[in-house]
Image: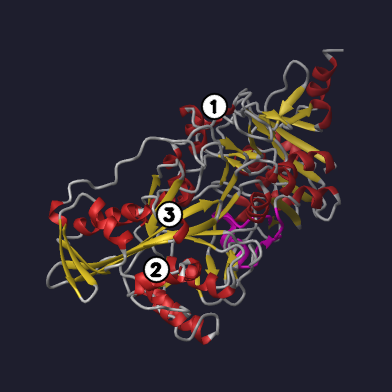
């Protein structure tokens, strides 16, 4: 009968003091996660703590003040934290509390199999609806499983808890005691971010395509990334934590879920934390579904999202691609959370992108240190393995490591390390035999100019990326060189070259982007770049002139690519104060002379001994970019 649940509810309604009186020494308690913590019940427990001993309090991520973590409480209430947040970091470090490392996807299973036994669950719920169902609101994560497994479930009924949909519902009959108490939900402050986080965020935002499904957590980097996604279209969300920033994107219409392939049109999360506006937004919002962390963090379910982009931070990365995210040496700093779940799930998703982001340096008592390191600190744990790593992003750029050998990984990571530490890292890599003994890198202070990247549309409609050459382009330059015919090599180098060994080739990949500039044209397919041509200049500081060379792969010659490379170099050079290009072209190199003639820039020529010396006045350059040709169907 409709009224029967009401009778049950009334019979089980008690005060907080009466409820916690049912907790006995030696019990194993669970307290709801983050904003789902029933603060009134917890305080009642702390007030009674002198009457009990050896309680184990299991919690995933407390917010705000944690009275049971204070020094001197450990003999009565000992924390077993599933994540080392700010609130319990010192408690764990001083062994006044414990830390149980486990992936979020596995935590419900630990409770279900009683490897983590629970006698009492302290949870926060909404008032029951007309059918007798309360909602767990912002904390479904592992709470839903604990409700099923606990011997005694005590619920704080809080009218300010938002009623959420999905797997959040608990019937009155599943709860043993009800404590009615209205209180504000704990707030997760928006962390202030700095310029370095904005630079990292800019690199990450370029990796997020329209229609992607994203996962972001809390912290400075996610807080900086989210606003930069404002111009994206039809993003979806599948994440463990739903936050203020994601809410703002949803309100702007950036998050629609229209292209999602798993729960289309729905925001999927397992917990939510933020400010009062977020909690109001979640209340009875049918676009948001909250599910258990074994469901949300399931690698299979994550991978079911097409173009899944997972954005996670870490503490340090070694030169082989091992990632530490939960400890600073022996000191536990955070936890496993859903980091590894989403890295692996996104890697398995069609067109997925698992991203690890971190500032390149950290400030310590000893001074500024690099967070890209030759080897992880003693005691550090590996959360993302060498086999799982894909993208690593710092303020200095993006390194893609998946499928790369150790030498390539080391060079890629050195290239996005802080310039002040690159020589030191290179020296360490050489000492460990990770890279060539003769390996060079650009001079100190040189940073890859990502702002010079541009995509052009060819006459046949094909999209070609033209970007500066990177120190990690050694294999790309090798592939390009060996794609040239003997004639093309002769015309470019004025002699026949049969081989281009690394010791010589690496010079072409290491430039300072000031006195020497090199750009490469590539076709991009996923993470694969196919080289088509390259152009470079070397400046004479005294004359403000630069010698230029352009070469295009044989099967791409005659398609206008050489002219585009020339014009792109010319606009870059002019911006850097170069007033003249010069070049020595073999007389039979009609293709290169055609490039000079077709740029529309006045030039002077002088022929001597089969070589044409060309001078181009860059002050006459009027167009910064090559005009786009009319769109044609790609062939």
In the depicted structure, whether residue 419 falls above or below residue 392:
below
Return the x and y of residue 512 as percentages of the image width and height: 31, 69
Q: Which residues are magenta?
A: 81-103
Q: In the rendered picture of this protein, how many numbered marks are placed on residues?
A: 3
In depth, the one of 72 and 562 nearer the eye is 562
Q: Is residue 162 magenta?
A: no
Residue 596 in which image quadrant: bottom left
Asked if the residue under mark 2 is in contact with the one under mark 3, i.e. CB atoms within 8 Å, the reply is no
Secondary structure found at label 1: helix
Secondary structure found at label 2: loop
Is residue 586 found left or right of 470 in the rendered image?
left
The nearer-to-camera label among 3 and 1 is: 3
Return the x and y of residue 283 as percentages of the image width and height: 60, 25
The disc placed on residue 200 is 3
Q: Residue at x 72, y 19 (%)?
A: 129
In the depicted structure, whether residue 111 falls above or below residue 402:
above
**Local crowd at mark 2 within 10 Å, few (<14), some, or many (≥20)?**
many
Asked if the residue under mark 1 is in contact with the one under mark 3, i.e. CB atoms within 8 Å, the reply is no
Q: Which residue carries the number 2 mark? A: 418
Residue 143 in which image quadrant: top right
Q: What's the distance in space between the residues labelled 3 and 1, CA to CA?
A: 29 Å
Residue 301 in which image quadrant: top right
Is residue 551 found left or right of 90 in the rendered image?
left
In depth, the one of 161 and 351 nearer the eye is 351
In the depicted structure, whether residue 310 falls above or below residue 422:
above
Which comes before the other along the chain, label 3 or label 2?
Answer: 3
Which comes before the other along the chain, label 3 or label 1?
Answer: 3
Q: Which residue carries the number 1 mark? A: 281
Q: Is residue 510 visible?
A: no
Q: What's the distance in space between the residues labelled 3 and 2, CA to CA?
A: 13 Å
């Amino acid at each position: 009968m409709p009224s029967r649940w009401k009778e049950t509810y009334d019979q089980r309604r008690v005060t907080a003091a009466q409820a916690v009186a049912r907790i006995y020494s030696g019990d194993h308690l669970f307290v709801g996660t983050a904003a789902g913590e029933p603060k009134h019940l917890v305080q009642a427990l702390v007030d009674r703590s002198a009457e009990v001993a050896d309680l184990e309090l299991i919690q995933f991520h407390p917010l705000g003040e944690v009275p049971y973590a204070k020094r001197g409480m450990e003999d009565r209430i000992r924390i077993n934290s599933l994540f080392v947040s700010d609130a319990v970091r010192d408690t764990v470090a001083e062994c006044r509390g414990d830390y149980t490392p486990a992936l979020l996807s596995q935590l419900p299973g630990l409770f279900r199999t009683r490897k983590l036994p629970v006698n009492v669950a302290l949870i926060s719920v909404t008032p029951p609806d007309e059918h007798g169902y309360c909602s767990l609101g912002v904390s479904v994560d592992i709470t839903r499983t604990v409700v099923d497994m606990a011997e005694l479930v005590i619920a704080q009924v809080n009218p300010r808890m938002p009623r959420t949909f999905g797997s959040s519902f608990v019937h009155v009959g599943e709860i043993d005691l009800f404590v009615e108490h209205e209180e504000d939900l704990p707030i997760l402050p928006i962390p202030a971010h700095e310029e370095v986080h904005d630079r990292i965020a800019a690199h990450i935002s370029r990796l997020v395509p329209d229609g992607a499904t994203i996962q972001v957590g809390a912290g400075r980097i996610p807080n900086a990334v989210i606003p930069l996604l404002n111009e994206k279209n039809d993003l979806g969300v599948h994440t463990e934590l739903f936050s203020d920033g994601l809410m703002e994107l949803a309100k702007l219409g950036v998050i629609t879920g229209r292209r999602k392939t798993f729960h289309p049109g729905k925001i999927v999360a397992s917990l939510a934390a933020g400010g009062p506006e977020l909690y109001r937004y979640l209340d009875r919002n049918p676009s948001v579904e909250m599910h258990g962390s074994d469901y949300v963090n399931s690698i299979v379910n994550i991978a079911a999202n097409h173009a899944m982009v997972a954005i996670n931070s870490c503490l340090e990365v070694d030169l082989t691609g091992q990632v530490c995210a939960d400890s600073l040496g022996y000191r536990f700093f955070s936890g496993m959370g859903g980091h590894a779940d989403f890295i692996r799930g996104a890697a398995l998703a069609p067109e997925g992108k698992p991203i690890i982001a971190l500032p390149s340096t950290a400030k310590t008592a000893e001074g500024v240190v690099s967070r890209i390191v030759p080897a992880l600190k003693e005691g550090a744990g590996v959360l993302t393995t060498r086999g799982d790593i894909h993208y690593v992003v710092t303020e200095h750029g993006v390194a893609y490591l998946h499928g790369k050998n150790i030498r390539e990984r080391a060079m890629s990571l050195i290239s996005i390390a802080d310039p002040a530490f690159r020589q030191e890292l290179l020296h360490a890599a050489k000492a460990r035999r990770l890279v060539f003994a003769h390996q060079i890198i650009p001079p100190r202070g040189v940073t890859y100019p990502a702002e010079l990247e541009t995509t052009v549309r060819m006459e046949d409609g094909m999209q070609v990326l033209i970007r500066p050459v990177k120190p990690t382009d050694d294999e790309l330059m090798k592939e390009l060189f060996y794609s040239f015919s003997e004639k093309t090599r002769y015309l470019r180098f004025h002699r026949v070259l049969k081989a281009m060994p690394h010791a010589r080739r690496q010079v072409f990949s290491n430039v300072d982007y000031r006195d020497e500039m090199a750009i490469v044209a590539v076709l991009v397919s996923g993470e694969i770049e196919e080289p088509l041509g390259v152009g470079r200049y070397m400046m004479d500081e005294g004359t403000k002139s630069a010698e230029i060379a352009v070469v295009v792969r044989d099967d791409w010659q005659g398609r206008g690519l050489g002219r585009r490379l020339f014009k792109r170099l010319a606009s870059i050079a002019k911006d850097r104060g170069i007033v003249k290009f010069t070049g020595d072209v073999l007389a039979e190199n009609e293709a290169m002379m055609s490039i000079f003639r077709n740029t529309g820039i006045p030039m002077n020529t002088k022929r001597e001994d089969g070589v044409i010396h060309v001078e181009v006045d860059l002050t006459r350059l009027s167009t910064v970019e090559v005009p786009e040709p009319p769109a044609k169907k790609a062939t």
